[in-house]
Amino acid sequence: MNEDEEAAGLASTSNYRYAQQIGSQLLVAGQVPHDATRQLVGGGDPSAQATQCLKNLCTLIEHHEFEQRDIRRLVVYVVGDEQNLTRAWSAVSTWFDNQVPPATLLGVALLGHEGQLVEIDATILKDKG
C-alpha cells in the first residue's frame, strides 16, 4: 500500500495495493467497508457497509486526482438474501442521487473479511475531452 493512501484516510493493509493509474484510467481494487483504523463499519447492515465502501472509493479516487463523475461502472457484491441486495442497492442509489453509473448487483456466498456483507468494485476513467 502507498503510505500516501493511508495518509488520505484509507486503512493500512499489507501486501495489498488499492489502485494503479494507467494513463487516464485508475484500476482499483474492490473497496471494503472498513474505516481508516481497519474496523468493520455497519456490522450486519448492508446499507451502512455499501455507504462505507463508496466513501472509501471516493477517498481513493480523489487521492489519485480523479472525481466521482469519472466512475464509469460499478460492481456491487452482496452477501445474503434479496433484502440485503435491496438495502445495499438503495444506499448506492442514494449516494449517486439516483444517477448510478452502469452497474451490476451480484449476490455472493462469501467475501474476504469476517462480517463483510458488501464490496464495491469500479471502473474509473477520466474523460479526455
Image (cartoon, rainbow, N blue to C red):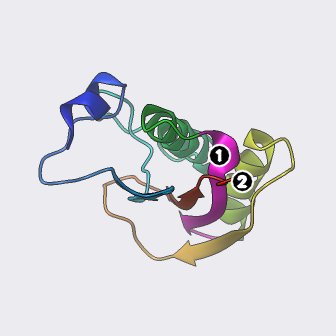
Q: Position of residue 13 (x, y in %)?
A: 19, 43
- Decide if residue 53 is on the left or right side of residue 7: right
Choose the circle earlier in sequence order: 2 or 1.
1
Residue found at the very far front of the displayed protein? 129
- Decide if residue 66 is on the left or right side of residue 11: right
Q: Which residues are magenta?
A: 67-81
Q: Position of residue 18 (x, y in %)?
A: 32, 50
The magenta stretch spans residue 14: no
| Element class at badge 2 | helix
Residue found at the very far left of the displayed protein? 15
Residue found at the very far right of the displayed protein? 98
Image marks 2 and 1: residues in contact by CB distance under 8 Å = yes
Q: Residues within 10 Å of mark 2 (few under 14, many from 20)?
A: some
At a point 61% along the width and 75% down the height, the residue shown is 106
Q: Main secondary structure of the magenta part?
A: strand
From the viewer's perspective, is residue 82 above or below residue 12? below
From the viewer's perspective, is residue 12 above or below residue 37? below
- Decide if residue 103 is on the left or right side of residue 23: right
Based on the displayed image, in which of its 4 quarters is residue 88 positioned? bottom right
At a point 44% along the width and 39% down the height, the residue shown is 60
The magenta stretch spans residue 74: yes
- Decide if residue 114 is on the left or right side of residue 109: left
Residue under label 1: 47
Q: Position of residue 70 (x, y in %)?
A: 64, 50
Query: Identity of the amino acid at label 1?
Result: Ser
From the viewer's perspective, is residue 13 above or below residue 105? above
Q: Residues within 10 Å of mark 1 (few under 14, many from 20)?
A: many
Give the number of the disc on residue 87: 2
Query: Identity of the amino acid at label 2?
Result: Arg
Q: Nearer the viewer, residue 98 or 28?
A: 28
